[in-house]
Image (tube, rainbow, N blue to C red):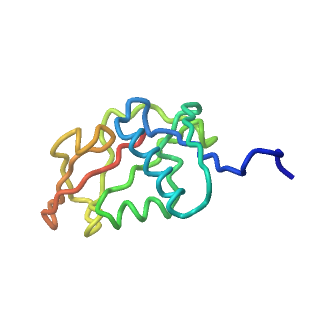
Amino acid sequence: GGVVGEPASLEIVLTPTYSGCPATEVIEQAISEAIDAAGLGPVRVTQRRAPAWTTDWITPEGRERLRAYGIAPPGSCASEATGANVQPIRLMARNVDCPRCGSAQTERLSAFGSTACKSLYRCISCREPFEHFKPI
């Protein structure tokens, strides 16, 4: 089946990592261009802001890819979106392991990295800097 007179098209629903993310339009354009380049037909990219995106939606494979890229993945924040119990706000930072050597001997250099959703760390063991994706 399908609607007569209208070509089949794809709809991609994008949930931004946070509502003020300046890369959202660039990401939408890149998705449209990739679908077009693959010859998959017309595409419509829409945004859905509710429920709000959470780092709990990152799959184990996605977390491993972040680590392989040199970014420390976030810990769980037990968001309501995952059905988990909501945890109290942490006043002390979690221990962030180095994504390169695995050492727990790390220090935060800055609350903000290349984007607002990441912070900048350095490993004391291997001396390499790295970013940590903040749990949101």
Residue visible at 57% across and 34% down? 48
Above-or-below relation of 131 to 79: below
Please identify the quarter of the rendering in which residue 65 is found. bottom left
Q: Quadrant of the C terminus?
A: top left
**Left/right of residue 10 with respect to residue 33 in the rendered view:** right
**Left/right of residue 1 with respect to residue 55 in the rendered view:** right
**Left/right of residue 133 with respect to residue 46 in the rendered view:** left
Percent x, y for residue 46?
A: 57, 38
Percent x, y for residue 39?
A: 57, 62
Residue visible at 43% across and 51% down? 30
Residue visible at 58% across and 31% down? 50
**Left/right of residue 46 with respect to residue 112 in the rendered view:** right
Percent x, y for residue 8?
A: 72, 51
Residue visible at 83% across and 46% down? 4
Q: Nearer the viewer, residue 79 or 7?
A: 7
Q: Nearer the viewer, residue 104 or 2?
A: 2
Q: Nearer the viewer, residue 57 or 19?
A: 19
Percent x, y for residue 28?
A: 46, 44
